[in-house]
Amino acid sequence: MKAVIMAGGKGTRIASLNSEVPKPMIPIAGKPVLEHQIDCLRSQGITDIQLIIGHLGNVVKEYFQSSVSYITESEPLGTAGALYYLNGQVEDDFLLIHGDVIFDIDVERFREFHLKRGGLVTVFTHPNDHPYDSGIVIADSNGKVTKWLSKEDERGWYKNRVNAGLHMMSPKLLNRFTEARKTDLDRDILKPLISENSLFAYDSPEYVKDMGTPERCYETERDILTGKVRAKNLRNKQKALFIDRDGTINKFAGFLRNIDNFELIENTTDIIKAANKEGYLVIVVTNQPVIARGELTWPQLEEIHNKMETLLGQRGAYVDDIFICPHHPDKGFEGERPEYKISCGCRKPKPGLLLQAARKYNIDLSRSIMLGDSEKDMLAGEAAGCKSVLIDHINPSGVSIDILKEQ
């Protein structure tokens, strides 16, 4: 597979770190951002690597010499204009990477998702700790992108999923580049694909962080040196904080049916934020019998979870996924949905939700934690092989973030 890296950025926001090299050549943990990217690709057998260079491109060429190939912009062509030079030169689906991101992902897993969906482009999306100033990508259950909210767009409650700067592309897309002209990848290429049903989103909790500010550079350097970046690759066993919702993330309000009654518990928000920084996957596992009882629809439940993700994001915290049991075995409720009135293996205290997550994300359950406010949560965690920690929803401040350091 071919990888193309857009390495011509000036990096005006981080010029204070080093204004004598292009943004992708700023050193992080002893070597340039570009070298981190190339090392990750080569470790997975990807050796056909081409760099698109422009601003201070001579610095890139002097460093990498002939170990990679180059496309040189004689004048700035935006974030996609240079793809014109690939037209007719690429026969297979390829990986396009922004040159200012540190990442370590399972590339083959990403590629397989892309090929199965059959779209022209698949963008890599993930949650982050600043979604309020990022573009939000909205996709359906199959990963087809249905909407793309820019930072300037008006928002309601939203799922915290942003474009990470990695893209799988079909060579068919290159036929649209008929001349070398300044082109914006997001605005001119990706967003128009939504109406064509040709843009998909691959959602993953793996490590991808852009070098947009000095603060992010310093944070990423710490993550590299502590091993967090490599550990988050899904080829490696993960550790997870499984967390109940009602009475644990949000203040207990019985069967929550009204979105206005959703209110975060601050102490749990702090624990989630700490878990994000410690490299845990944060996965919500929640019984929601309101679906079986006919008291909420799936879109209404999704909007409640969008509110949860929006509020967490405003506080610099995020969840990586949500696993829901909609079943309820007891019958006799007005408006109930018979298809969900079953005895299942996912309703806590059974461990089904945790086991589903473990299969999806390669989780080592023995290194993971179940945090909840009921005996059902504790039994589910123990049945899955996790450490179980009880939180008192009357006094949730009693659980410390120290629980994360014990695993």
Image (cartoon, grey):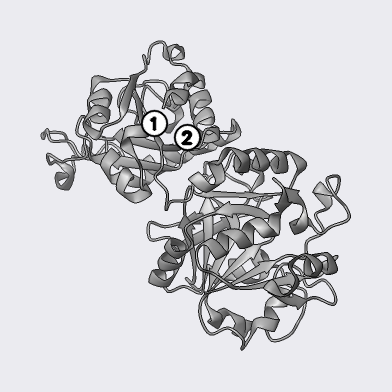
Contact check, label 2 and label 1, Cβ < 8 Å: no
Mark yes or no: residue 156 visible.
Answer: no
Residue at position x 77%, y 52% in the image: 26
Residue 245 in sight here: yes
Q: Circle 2: is it few (<14), some (14-19), or many (20+) Cα within 10 Å?
A: many
Q: Reply above or below: 377 against 52.
A: above
Observer-nearest of 66 and 252: 66
Above or below — where is 307 with respect to 402? Answer: below
Q: Which residue is mark 2?
A: 308
SS class of the residue under badge 1? loop
Say what amino acid the circle numbered 1 marks.
Answer: Asn
Q: Residue furthest right?
A: 20
* Amino acid marked by disc 2: Met
For the image, the number of numbered tags is 2
Q: Is residue 323 left or right of residue 169?
A: left
| Spatial CA span between label 2 and label 1 | 13 Å
The percent position of residue 348, horizontal first and vertical second, equals 22, 32
Q: In front here: 157 or 350?
A: 350
Of mark 2 and mark 1, the one earlier in the sequence is 1
Residue named by callout 1: 258
The C terminus lies in quadrant: top left
The image quarter containing residue 95 is bottom right
- Name the residue at 68% across, 72% down: 67
Please tell me which residue is depicted at 34% across the width and 24% down the height of the picture: 372
Residue 80, x across and y down, in percent: 69, 71
Q: Residue 345: horizontal and vertical position, in percent?
A: 17, 40
